[in-house]
Image (tube, rainbow, N blue to C red):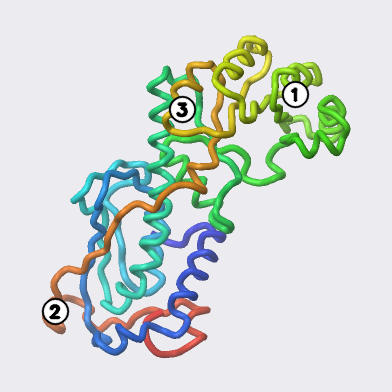
Amino acid sequence: MGRLAAHAERLLELALEEDLLLGDATSEATIEADARGEGRFLVKEPLVLAGTAVAARAFEVLGAECRFDRRDGARAAPGEVVGVARGPLRALLAAERTALNFLQRLSGVATATRACADALAAAGGRTRLLDTRKTTPGWRLLEKAAVRAGGGKNHRFSLGDGILVKDNHVAACGGVAEAVRRARAQAGALLKIEVEVVDLAGLDQAIAAGADIVLLDNMDDATLAEAVHRAAGRVPLEASGNMTLERLPRVAAAGVDFVSMGAITHGARAVDVSFELAPPRPRGSGPGSRRPVRRPGRVARRRGAGPR
């Protein structure tokens, strides 16, 4: 499948390095260097797939092959095989845990996102689901891709993607109006200015100051509905804070344009997928049975023996 984006390649290299820094003592002791085999990814619970590219790449870096038979965003049911890896047995076992860590974690994000997006859609479909910057350090690119695979939309990727005036900015500037004035004076023509407010008075101030979007933070359902009525379509409204799957239909019914949830990334549970080897084939069977295991550059330089 080829190389990943540079950031993902670096992250994968670090993950393999921490697992294989001293080699694989068990496989090197028990499995012959020329042994080859096949393993399958078996789904153990209902899920939405994500992270297949980085999982497959973990095997390729170590000299094996891996293919998934469906794209990120596809649903999978218990008992289904969604991918197969083939190659040197040592390479398969060396890549297994790293590949599963990425696949289980990112599929967990996509699965949680899909459940929330479906809950919003069931309430009428107008309110869209956004993620946040509450991501695993170093994993943001991958986790935000998993959100998209699950049917959500991405909010800011970084602090430079947009202006979001939060409570501390307001406090530092002496008020909403002054914070928006300063932001407007410095922002480029295409940079949106969003203002976080915690009550209806703050909403009025943000609209009067010229905010492009208003984030309604930690408001109950009745206050959200009143905020929608008061804004009267003048600015898009985003609801955030204390959002749960069970609450989402009520929030959508209030009429907000967006709901942002940090829980779909920081609170997502890794889903249950296993990697199971097929019974071994006789030695020397199949083409290329003695092809050597490839070693990734940085890990290989730590120690010469064994799969990397």
Left or right: 308, with 84 as reference point? right
Front residue (pair 240, 233) = 240
Q: CA distance from mark 3 to mark 2?
A: 57 Å
Query: Could you tell me how many numbered marks the image carries?
Result: 3
Picture quarter with the C terminus: bottom left
Q: Which residue is mark 3?
A: 247
Left or right: 203, with 238 as reference point? right
Q: Amino acid at mark 3?
A: Arg
Graded by Cα atoms within 10 Å as few (under 14), some (14 to 19) or many (20 or more), the crowding at tag 2 reads few
Q: Amino acid at mark 1?
A: Ala
First-in-chain label (3 vs 2): 3
Q: Amino acid at mark 2?
A: Ser
Residue occupying the point 70% across, 30% down? 196
| Above-or-below relation of 35 to 44 | below
Front residue (pair 102, 199) = 199
First-in-chain label (3 vs 1): 1
Residue occupying the point 67% across, 18% down? 235
Graded by Cα atoms within 10 Å as few (under 14), some (14 to 19) or many (20 or more), the crowding at tag 3 reads some
Q: What secondary structure is found at the residue carrying circle 1?
A: loop
Q: Which residue is mark 1?
A: 211
Q: What secondary structure is found at the residue carrying circle 3?
A: loop
At which x and y percent is residue 294? 38, 79
Q: Are marks 3 and 1 in contact (CB under 8 Å)?
A: no
Q: Which residue is mark 2?
A: 285
Q: Nearer the viewer, mark 3 or mark 2?
A: 3
| Above-or-below relation of 162 to 300 | above
